[in-house]
Image: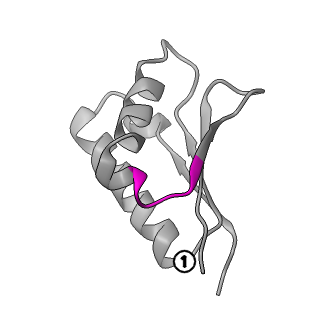
């Protein structure tokens, strides 16, 4: 059972709205399947709109139930960490 970190870099699809939610959903699924301890989402600095979209996705009730906590990287505005807890 792996406890490693998974990473999703949204730079390649930052302007493709329909693909962003699908990529986030797939990353959550992959992290859960691997029982990863964390998922790092790289949304970049930019205008902050992509990060807001990521945070809105993560705040959905159905998604929030799937992770333990999230942390905005204090040293890098363009990163968000999602932490999982497995039994």
Q: Residue furthest left?
A: 18
The answer to whether residue 2 is magenta is no
In the visual, does 16 lie left or right of 63?
left
Residue 60, by quadrant, is: top left
Res. 72 visible in picture: yes
Count of all numbered marks drawn on residues in the image = 1
From the viewer's perspective, is residue 35 above or below residue 74? Answer: below
Main SS of residues in magenta: loop
Task: Give the residue pinned by disc 1.
Answer: 34
In the visual, does 9 lie left or right of 63?
right
Instruction: Identify the residue at image location x=58%, y=49%.
Output: 69
Quadrant position of the C terminus in the picture: bottom right
- The spot of residue 40 in percent (x, y) is 61, 49
In this picture, which residue range is highlighted in magenta?
Answer: 64-69
Instruction: Identify the residue at image location x=58%, y=20%.
Output: 45
In the visual, does 66 lie left or right of 74?
left
In front here: 67 or 51?
A: 67
């Amino acid at each position: 059972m792996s406890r490693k970190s998974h990473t999703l870099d949204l730079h390649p699809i930052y302007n493709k709205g329909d693909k962003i939610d699908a990529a986030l959903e797939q990353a959550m699924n992959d992290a859960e399947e691997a029982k990863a301890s964390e998922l790092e989402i790289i949304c970049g600095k930019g205008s902050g709109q992509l990060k807001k979209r990521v945070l809105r996705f993560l705040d959905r009730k159905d998604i929030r139930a799937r992770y333990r906590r999230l942390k905005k990287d204090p040293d890098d505005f363009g990163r968000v960490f999602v932490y999982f807890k497995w039994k």
